[in-house]
Amino acid sequence: MASYNSVEIKLFHARQHLESLKAILQGYFESKPCGMIRDADSTLDQPTFTFSVMKPIPARLGLVLGDCLQNVRSALDYLIWELVLANQQTPGKHNMFPICTTEKSFKDAIRARRLEGVAPEPLALIDSLQPYRAGDLDAPGLPLTVLDELVNINKHRRVLFTVVRSIPGSSMETIQVGSETWGRPSVEAMQSDVDFGRKLTLQDAQTHGSIAAFVAIGEGPAKGSEATLVASALLEFTATEVAGQFTRFFE
């Protein structure tokens, strides 16, 4: 019997991994792993300091991040399985939710039977949600494309690489994520490629007020972006803007 419940369970597990990710990061930063070290050639007139990371990022952080995103991606494949059942058809290993940046790749997915057995109405909705619908320039940066690429990196190449990055404290912005208030680097700061090794003069330090450190994804389309915010954004987008649109087919 078809049910949306399996999709919800996968998304629930993704949220559990996200909470674990936050806990790991909280423990890491509570251990004071970073600091500003005065340079050996620093002078009294022009003191300079370099941002330094003294403790490595916990190795399991990349594993937990990958598991979170993998559960989000798998929820969409579970959705296709249930949609086939809802259409009183028999799903198989060929069924999966395609994420396509070109119209050709979507047609190829249809030929590969990815959506075989899905009824016309949900099939049309799946097509409308494809990144290729936004055009060639925008498709690579859309949430579903980012999710798919990060999961493929984690699944086929390596555990998702993460790095500690530093930015001026003035480049942090406060945002609301559900019931929580989070600090987030501004888009400009995240794209500035500032890594550990950032050197500041005393005048810079007085201007910026503080240096903020965060753990960023180190590769792929989300490179340089704070890890928990990427995971949270992709999870909530998938749950509400994609999978959530299909609940009516199970009522």
Image (cartoon, rainbow, N blue to C red):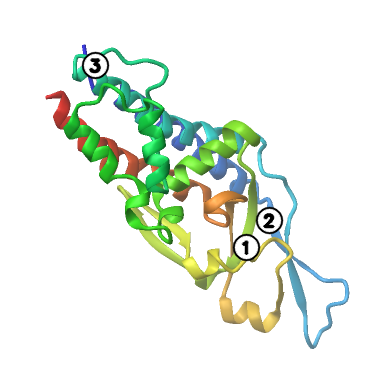
Q: Which mark is residue 71?
A: none
| Residue farthest along the bottom direction in this orientation | 45
| Residue farthest along the left direction in this orientation | 251
* Image quarter hosting the N terminus: top left
- Check disc 1: other Cα within 10 Å, few if <14, some if 14-19, many if 20+: many
Q: Residue drawn 22% across and 38% down?
A: 124
* Secondary element type, mark 3: helix
Residue pointed to by mark 2 = 34
What is the CA distance from the residue labelled 3 to the residue labelled 2?
Answer: 52 Å
Q: Residue drawn 78% across and 85% down?
A: 46
* First reached walking from the N terminus: tag 2 or tag 1: 2
* Secondary element type, mark 2: strand
What is the CA distance from the residue labelled 2 to the residue labelled 1?
Answer: 9 Å
Residue pointed to by mark 1 = 166
* Secondary element type, mark 1: strand
* Image quarter hosting the C terminus: top left
Q: Position of residue 74 (x, y in %)?
A: 41, 28
Residue pointed to by mark 3 = 85
Q: Position of residue 195 (x, y in %)?
A: 67, 62
